[in-house]
Amino acid sequence: MNKLLQFSVASLLAVTGFSASADTLSDVRSKGILSCGVSTGLAGFSSVDKHHKWTGLDVDFCKAVAAATLGDSSKVKYIPLTGKERFTALQGGEIDILSRVTTWTQTRDTSLGLNFAGVIYYDGQGFMVKKNSGIKDASELGGATFCVNEGTTTELNLADYAKSEGFSYKLATTDTIAQTKSNFELGRCDVLTTDQSRLYALRTTLKDPSSAIVLPNIISKEPLAPVVRQGDNKWFNIVRWTLNAMLTAEELGVTSANVDKASNNSEINRLLGHTGTMGKNLGLDKKWSYHIIKQVGNYSEIFERNIGVNTPINISRGLNALWTKGGIMYSPPFR
């Protein structure tokens, strides 16, 4: 290894605070708890309910990883993080996994010493306006002031969109989504822009949800994914295949209610550890995916429980339906 390469490797490790010999699984088992970075509060994805418990799609994924690695989905410490804090917290080892409505981009994937472990929700940036504004389409937003959350992909997407459409605009930036929502309610901006799923979630928490509408326009691709540090392939595989197990369970019709009776199918038997060495290959016991499904559920269960059409968020599956049902959700096979 030449001196320049040695310097580059040392520099990367210094930035990430992480070493190539790290073993996150052993650290998690030693602590007896999974440290999971979540948002500072976003209904349907990660927020504290009236019983002071964390709930949401991202929270359920944290629980799933805890079930896989510790056998107990309740063994999670939730660390609320702003957009600016999230990557530093992961790089520095403050958290074991980031499960926080985070968009997978090329720059983030290649320059921060991080790995994205698969898409948990396919999203896109949209716009929310006051109903009494009379605005019906994004083409009418020229000259508007936009509320945005600092440290996100939102600002760049908006700049690209405004340039392509040839309109000027102003920004009202904040550190947290709660502050962004407050600015919108107080009239400090004309438009709140973020991932469309967030807009639906935020609208339910307005003092008068009926006072705002979400425009139909989508201006970006926002694949939201759990994130881990580079340099620990075993942990990366565990997180990635936790998501795949939940998707495969839905595809095979295995739920938290019937998992104890599910069998008579070769892939189900491999998924649940009745046959094969799936758990051993990950450094986990053979019931790792059984614990996920029994204690947390398959992908459909966590989607419908947190953001589905029968919740206040009221989001249909759309792209997030299985590939067999018109969507693009797809797991590699368990074999």
Image (tube, grey):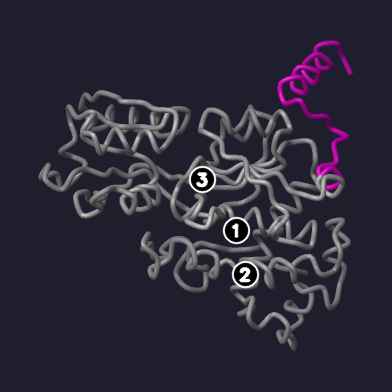
- Residue visible at 75% across and 62% down in the picture: 72
According to the picture, the residue beneath numbered tag 3 turns out to be 101
Q: Amino acid at mark 2?
A: Gly
Q: For numbered disc 3, what is the local secondary structure?
A: loop
- Residue visible at 58% across and 33% down in the picture: 86
In the image, taking residue 236 as reference, residue 176 lies left or right, namely left
Residue 174, image quadrant = top left
Q: Amino acid at mark 3?
A: Val
Q: Amino acid at mark 1?
A: Asp
Q: CA distance from mark 1 to mark 2?
A: 9 Å
Magenta-tinted stretch? 1-27
Along the line of sight, the residue nearer the viewer: 1 or 271? 271
In the image, taking residue 278 as reference, residue 93 lies left or right, namely left
- Rendered image: mark on residue 297: 2
Residue 3 sits inside the magenta stretch: yes
Q: Residue furthest top?
A: 3
Pointers 1 and 2 in contact (C-beta within 8 Å): yes
Of marks 1 and 3, which one's residue comes earlier in the chain?
1
Pointers 2 and 3 in contact (C-beta within 8 Å): no
